[in-house]
Every structure is written in structure tokens, then in C-alpha cells.
Amino acid sequence: MKQEEKQGQKEKRFRYADRSDVPLILEFIRALADYEHMLDQVVTTEALLEEWLFEKKKAEVIFAMEGDREVGFALFFHNFSTFLGRAGIYLEDLFVMPAYRGRGYGRGLLAQLARIGRERGCGRLEWWCLDWNRPSIDFYLSTGAEPMKDWTVYRLAGEKLDCLAAGP
């Protein structure tokens, strides 16, 4: 990157969410779900987010900042690779508000997660992406991310999860 381009760009700032951010986290989750045409599937509440993020500490959130305004977020947690013998970071959600896209906030959030992973000794950063979401796929490919071949995601939820849990 040319020196004058570097000088013309604002340095990206990030901050960890705290308990007072729960309503804002829910706003970002709903905005992402709306973008993904899945808003009807959002059943979480502020109380659930507060419990699981800040009491049970099962996931973390970072915000991308423009000035004093949160313009993007990433929700992540640790997983574990038996092959690597160490934890990784799983990115559950990454979303930048539409008015702030194309300014480097998405790449900045991924880079920040990579730094967090390296600081914590993690072996990888991974996530899923909807097959139809070509803009996100193109963005992820531009970062050097590689799609996983020969893997299919499976899920048990709701009644099916309950049924398996109740069985032998």
C-alpha cells in the first residue's frame, strides 16, 4: 500500500463488549438475521445474551468502532482441534452495518480475531458462510481463507435434540 494511502486511512479501533452492550448486541444479531433472511429464527433475548455471554462466559463479542459509534461486530468462542492439540476461535457471527461496508471494518474484525487467536495460542480461526452469500464468500476468499472441501455441517436442535438426549 502506498504511503499516502496509509496516511489517508483511519486506524481501525475495536473494543470488547461489556454487560451494558447487551441491547446493542441484540440489535446487531437482528440486523444480521435480517440480512440472511432468517429474522424469524431469532428467539434470543437480552436476558439470554446476558446470561450466556456475561454470566456463563460462553462467547465473546468485539465491536468495530468508527469514532464513538459501533459499526460492526463479531461474536466468537473457543473450540478445540484434537489434531492440532489446541484451541481455535470459532466465529459465529460477523456483521458490518451496510452504511459502513467497503471501509475495511470486516477485514479489520477478522484481523483482530486473528490477533486474539495468536495472543491466546490458538491454532486456527474458522466459521461457516451461507452458500448463497456470494459477497461474503468473495470477501472471505480475498482474506486468504479457504473453503473446507469434503465436509458437511450437521445439526440437531429442538425436538430432535430432545429425542436423542432422551434415548439410550
Image (spheres, rainbow, N blue to C red):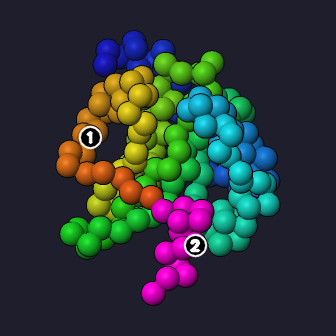
The residue labelled by disc 2 is 162
Residue 68 on image: x %, y % = 72, 33
Residue 25 on image: x %, y % = 70, 46
Q: Residues within 10 Å of mark 1 (few under 14, many from 20)?
A: some
Going by the numbered disc 1, the residue's amino acid type is: Pro
Q: Work out whether residue 149 or residue 115 is closer to the camera in this orientation and state it.
A: 149
6 relative to 131, above or below? above
Query: Callout 1: helix, strand or loop?
Result: loop
The residue labelled by disc 1 is 147
User: In this orientation, does residue 107 appear?
Assistant: yes
Quadrant for the C terminus in the image: bottom left
Residue 58 on image: x %, y % = 58, 67
37 relative to 166, above or below? above
The residue stretch that appears in magenta: 156-168
**Left of 7 or right of it: where is 148?**
left
Q: Residues within 10 Å of mark 2 (few under 14, many from 20)?
A: few
Quadrant for the N terminus in the image: top left
